[in-house]
């Protein structure tokens, strides 16, 4: 009998090498140019972060369900947000809000970032731990908590990446951003856009970017 990580007797990792290459080629064609990001996207086994039944679609440029009403973002969105956060600088200490299945944390770890990741749903966080362990990426500090409040005990952060759409910019997260740091997050309800925030000595510079679609950023934890 084939193992859970095989199909037709072959390892998904073996089957996915060609599709991983196609994915990174597609990312380049769509404007992703940071080689650290492209290398991380190629090396992280995305098929281990989705349900086995969806593994053959893992490297397509689509978001996929991961249970509990949550999704794994499409590869282009993950690459775009990571590149915005890291462009022109060293990764440093990063806070992720919305761990989900753990894929974004895995990509950040592969770039060399020190990763803290918060998730409000305990069941999803357990899933992320299993996925990261299966991928041999266990250095992320995973926290069960309300992402709106951030993680003040570990602040300041060089970067904050938010994987759920807020109605407005969470003030607590801005406070936890180091001077010179960046935050990338989706904002909006019916219409959402990606925003880049850069904290300077003069204040916070805000740049509106691409239209996106994320699940909402909710309060509390469960």
Image (cartoon, rainbow, N blue to C red):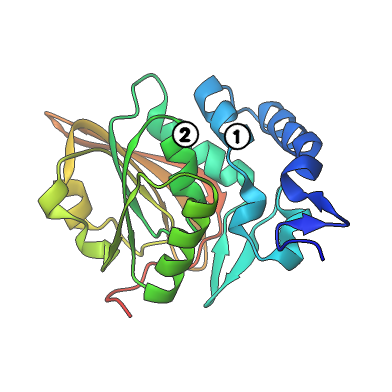
Residue 82, percent from left and from top = 46, 37
Tell me if mark 1 has few (under 14), some (14-19) or many (20+) residues whose alpha carbon lies within 10 angstroms of its own. some
Where's the N terminus, which quadrant?
bottom right
Closer to us: 31 or 103: 103
Binning the other alpha carbons within 10 Å of mark 2 as few (below 14), some (14 to 19) or many (20 upward) gives some
| Element class at badge 1 | helix
Quarter residue 26 falls in = top right
Please count the marks in the image.
2
Residue farthest to the bottom?
Answer: 222
Residue highlighted by disc 1: 43
Disc with the residue nearer the chain's start (1 vs 2): 1
Q: In this view, does 157 lie to the left or right of 121?
A: left
x and y, in percent, of residue 53 in the image: 75, 67
| Quarter containing the C terminus | bottom left
List x then y, in percent, for residue 28. 67, 26
Q: Which residue is drawn at 47% across and 53% down?
A: 133
Residue 129 visible to an observer of this rendering: yes
Q: Mark 2 points at which residue?
A: 110
Q: Do the residues labelled 1 and 2 touch (CB within 8 Å)?
A: yes
In the foreground, 176 or 189: 176
Residue at the image position 47 percent from the left and 34 percent from the top = 110
Image check: 13 left or right of 102? right
- Along the line of sight, the residue nearer the viewer: 31 or 46: 46
């Amino acid at each position: 009998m084939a193992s859970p990580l095989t199909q037709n007797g072959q390892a998904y990792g073996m089957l996915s090498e060609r599709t991983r290459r196609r994915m990174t080629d597609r990312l380049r064609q769509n404007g992703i140019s940071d080689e650290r990001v492209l290398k991380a996207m190629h090396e992280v086994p995305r098929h281990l972060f989705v349900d086995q039944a969806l593994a053959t679609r893992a490297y397509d440029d689509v978001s996929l369900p991961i249970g509990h009403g949550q999704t794994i973002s499409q590869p282009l969105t993950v690459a775009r947000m990571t590149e915005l956060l890291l462009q022109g600088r060293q990764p440093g200490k990063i806070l992720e809000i919305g761990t989900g299945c753990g894929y974004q944390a895995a990509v950040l770890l592969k770039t060399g970032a020190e990763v803290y990741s918060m998730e409000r749903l305990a069941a999803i966080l357990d899933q992320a731990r299993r996925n990261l362990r299966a991928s041999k990426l266990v250095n992320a500090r995973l926290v069960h908590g309300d992402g709106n409040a951030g993680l003040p005990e570990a602040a300041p952060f060089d970067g904050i990446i938010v994987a759920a759409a807020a109605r407005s910019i969470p003030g607590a997260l801005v406070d936890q951003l180091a001077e010179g740091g960046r935050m990338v997050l989706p904002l909006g309800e019916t219409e959402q856009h990606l925003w880049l925030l850069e904290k300077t000595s003069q204040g916070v510079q805000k740049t509106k970017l691409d239209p996106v679609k994320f699940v909402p950023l909710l309060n509390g934890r469960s």
